[in-house]
Amino acid sequence: MKIAIIFDNFGPYHLARLRAAAEVASHDPKAAAKLYDDIAADRSIGAEQQDLAKVRAAGLLVDTAAYSEMLQRLESSTGPEATFRHTARELLALSAWRANDTTAARKWLDLIANDGETPPSLRSRAEALQALLPPVAKS
């Protein structure tokens, strides 16, 4: 399983940091996002663990952060080989929709739709969000 591989070189200290951030999230999402940001900036862990922390932080901030901030946080995690690309794309689509940026929302939703490895549940959520967008103007 890919998740098990991600944590092979992830020691108890790093797992404890993830757990602490998750516990803080229940009562102070912004503080938890900062903890996840610190983990994402830690060069002693692998890129996949850093991406996980980025995605977790962004998930906590999606309702309050500007789309530009979300894009800055997540764009590097949306590439075709990125482990958490599906979640990163979904968060960016949702953030763009909340910002009334239909062009950006469509971009991320199209990437989700065209990725054959997109999980079915995420694909369904993306289709629901796509249905909320206004029709594309015909030229």
Image (cartoon, rainbow, N blue to C red):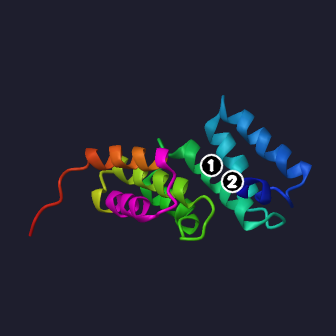
* Residue 69 makes an appearance in the image: no
Q: Quadrant of residue 38?
A: bottom right
Residue 117: in magenta span: yes
User: Residue at 48% across / 61% down in the picture?
Assistant: 71
Q: Quadrant of the C terminus?
A: bottom left
* Residue 90 makes an appearance in the image: yes
Under circle 1, the secondary element is helix
Under circle 2, the secondary element is helix
Q: Nearer the viewer, residue 118 or 129?
A: 118
What type of secondary structure mainly makes up the magenta span? helix
Contact (Cβ within 8 Å) of mark 2 with mark 1: yes
Which residues are the magenta region?
Answer: 104-121
User: Residue at 39% across / 49% down in the picture?
Assistant: 126
Q: Which residue is mark 2?
A: 53
Q: Which residue is mark 1?
A: 57
Residue 110: in magenta span: yes
Mark 2 belongs to which amino acid?
A: Ala
Relative horizontal placement of residue 118, taking residue 26 as reference (left or right): left
As drawn, the residue found furthest toward the top would be 27
Q: Quadrant of residue 85?
A: bottom right
Label 2 crowd bin: few (<14), some (14–19), many (20+), radius 10 Å: many
